[in-house]
Image (cartoon, rainbow, N blue to C red):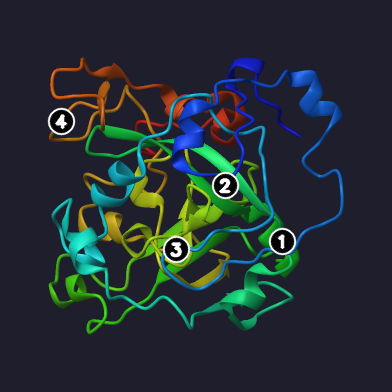
Amino acid sequence: MLIKKPSDIRPSEITSESNYLNRRQFMRAGSIAGASLLAGPALSAVVPAGDRAKLPDVRKSPYSTSEKPNSYEDITTYNNSYEFGTGKEDPFRNAQDFEARPWSITVDGHAEKTGTFDFDDFIKPFDLEERIYRMRCVEAWSMVIPWVGISLADIVKHHNPTSKAKYVAFETLYDRKRMPGQRRRVLDWPYREGLTIAEATNPLTILAVGVYGESMPNQNGAPIRLVVPWKYGFKGIKGIVRISFTEKQPPVSWNLSAPHEYGFYANVNPEVDHPRWSQATERRIGSGLFAPRIPTQMFNGYGEQVAHLYKGLDLRKNY
């Protein structure tokens, strides 16, 4: 199990935004090792329906950063979700009437446990965890977001992929009536993403179902989305309705749209610029108009946990 350094561990309670910002104590690595998140009775994940529904029984996580999270307003009003429009404020404006329940998720491909599952049944076998992660957009801005989610490794294990499963593919809902951005041919809808099986089962990777201890806002990917903190934000596919275990590398939306600009891996890498802008620095949302840009870290600062996944891989060619 990967344990972060003491300075990277934040023992925040799953409470309101104001309490997040008031609590500044950090746990020692030894106490985390001794009192594992896995201690105590297993919990069943529950996400009540409704806007900003409180999420019960959320565990703390040693994988969280100690950095101050962005405000709820920052996180929910400045984001990319082309299903609801291409402007940063479009998702907030256009997703308010979206109904994320009822919802079902189909699991197919090279796995023993496949089928179509009601959302509540899909998440029920697992624990909810708070994961406060840095999020680096490919557009060179960033946030710190207190997600609530489920370990994707646990989900993968539960569905028992066969030896043929080398990748995990994801697909979002396609509904032009409910998602007005899909009426425009900005991308080849539905949105698609994918990971290697090793990336999907890394302890940092989660399927998120909430933020700030509450159910996932529509504009941020309700009811369930992917979060891979060492990759650019566009890998975080939203509104997932299909998970497929595949033998071959699956097609992914931005690579299909602009292969010379967006690769399959999309790891945060300050040494490989986007063809149209530098990736060496980033603008932290909420830091103020005149705040200096901050240096971007390799793998968004998660190299200790994930660099081994790419040993021997040319990250300039496999961007």
Q: Name the amino acid type tagged 2.
A: Thr
Left or right for 265, reference 165: left
Label 2, secondary structure: give it: loop
- Which of the 4 image quarters holds residue 56? bottom right
Name which residue type carries label 3.
Pro
Circle 4 crowding by C-alpha within 10 Å: few under 14, some 14–19, many from 20: few
Quadrant (top left/top right/bottom left/bottom right) for the N terminus: top right
**Residue 34 is drawn in which quadrant?**
top right
Left or right, 168 with respect to 179, comes to right
User: Of 117 and 299, which appears nearest the observer?
Assistant: 117
Mark 1 → mark 2, Cα distance in angstroms: 14 Å
Q: In the rendered image, is residue 109 in sight?
A: no
Q: Looking at the image, tell me whether mark 1 or mark 4 is earlier in sequence order.
A: 1
Specify the amino acid type for callout 4: Trp
Distance, label 3 to label 1, CA atoms, is 26 Å
Write down the residue under mark 1. Answer: 126
Residue 201 % position (x, y): 65, 49
Residue with the mark numbered 4 = 277
Circle nearer the N terminus (3, 2): 2
Find the distance from the CA under tag 3 to the CA under tag 4: 27 Å
- Kind of residue at badge 1: Phe
Q: Position of residue 14 (x, y in %)?
A: 59, 44
> Looking at the rendering, which quadrant does residue 204 occupy?
top right
Q: Which residue is mark 3?
A: 250
The residue that mark 2 highlights is 205
Tell me where residue 66 appears, x and y as whole percent.
Answer: 53, 24
Q: Position of residue 126 (x, y in %)?
A: 71, 61
